[in-house]
Image (cartoon, grey):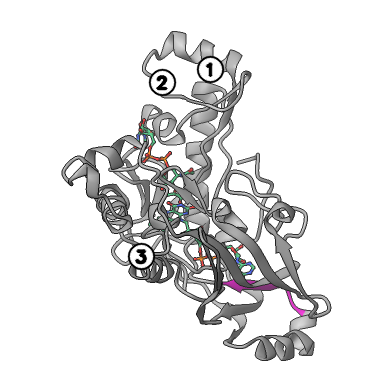
Amino acid sequence: MNTFHVDVQTRYFARFSSVSDLRSLLQDPLFKENPRLILGGGSNVLFRADFPGIVLRNELRGIQLVSETDAHYLVDAAAGENWHGFVMECINRNWAGVENLSLIPGSVGAGPMQNIGAYGIEIKDVIDSVEAMRMADGKILRFVNSECAFGYRDSIFKQAERDQWVILSVRFRLNKRPVFQIDYGAIQEELDRENPDRITIRDVSNAVIRIRRSKLPDPDELGNAGSFFKNPLVPLELFEALRSKWPDIPVYPVSEQIVKVPAGWLIEKAGWKGRRVGNCGMHGKQALVLVNYGGATGDELYAHSSRVLESVRDMFGISLEREVNVIPPVAQAGP
Ligand code: FAD
Ligand code: EPU
């Protein structure tokens, strides 16, 4: 149940497929006495060891059109729905807005937690609100978009309210008329093969799927959890110093004083791309993806990420931050 294919056990396991099931589980003494973890598809977690508590697998299902206006559809998707399945349903029904997020593994419910993003879109751009149950007392609350404190791979559910809520469903505001986000170079190149006047959301989705398949490893074949680190935010002064030494360093502007540098480039320059150490390594086609070649333990994978982190810090003076949820959690900045 984790896409790193780390062989770990949990002390207790339960699945829930209705809100009333979940409520009963929350009242169970076992639940109150043990550490707990809500699991969706397990595609953004690294278990360093057996889990000494209760893992709850979210299997809430359902996709519903709630209402519509001239411009928008409001659509509810239950947290246990498969994310890519939901995207495909939107494309089939011509609900626009999530096509750039095609083929991201995992569940709908984990999307707001990480504020998943790809190819110029983040889930926050299409979220109206998030419905969640507080584990402490079973109370259900709806967080409107502005209350979710969304940031780059970040939200209130990952920070101030971490481990307090079970996300039950996500309400999306989708477009009747597509607003295409196709500036990302690789998408443009893929779409150039299509007739530019007749691009559809399915074309964009297919382009994204082709690009992703060309560089990201399929977790069914090679254990991984996507990008292992975040792309770091770097002060302009440090960036200028780095650019004088490495003129080809890529950069994305963020503000007047801050830029974003692709971690994949830093890791590749530090010599880790495609280099295998034991059963671990950074992927040969995408250096930001930590892979389990088979049989690696969570601790081995974690130790490898520390080696990479330290060498990037030594070489560039930049501390990478892990994007994947490490369980049990460790101090983010350190190795
Ligand atoms: P899990 O791994 O099951 O859980 C992740 C975290 O969310 C855990 O802390 C868990 O406790 C919490 N959580 C899960 N469900 C709930 C819930 N219902 N309520 C409260 N908390 C919950 N991510 C991107 O953003 N962009 C990408 O392009 C991308 N590409 C990827 C490519 C590959 C090949 C892989 C393997 C991963 C990729 N990811 C990407 C990462 C991952 O797919 C996303 O983070 C996804 O949202 C994780 O969903 P999940 O259901 O598997 O979450
Ligand atoms: N690069 C390299 N070498 C590499 C990989 C990347 O030099 O091996 C440099 C290149 O300059 C390339 C740039 O990094 O142009 C960006 O690479 P890419 O387009 O593959 O995207 P990324 O920044 O590495 C981010 C997200 C991905 C998301 C893609 C597409 C993060 C941490 N990762 O990766 O999300 O799919 O953009 O938008 O922001 C994930 O979160 O798990 C994930 C896969």
Position of residue 165 in the picture relative to residue 305 (left or right): right
Spatial CA distance of label 3 from label 2 is 37 Å
* Quarter in which the C terminus is drawn: top right
Q: Position of residue 304 (x, y in %)?
A: 47, 46
Q: Residue at x 58, y 41 (%)?
A: 321
Rendered image: mark on residue 76: none
Q: Residue at x 55, y 48 (%)?
A: 323
Q: Which residues are magenta?
A: 34-39
Spatial CA distance of label 3 from label 1 is 40 Å
Residue type marked 1: Phe
Q: Residue at x 65, y 63 (%)?
A: 129
Ligand 1 contact, mark 3 (Cβ < 8 Å): no
Q: Position of residue 21 (x, y in %)?
A: 66, 91
Name the residue that disc number 1 marks: 239
Q: Are marks 2 and 1 in contact (CB under 8 Å)?
A: yes
Name the residue that disc number 2 marks: 249
Q: Residue furthest front?
A: 70
Residue type marked 2: Ile
Rendered image: mark on residue 91: 3
Quadrant of the rendered image containing residue 190? top left
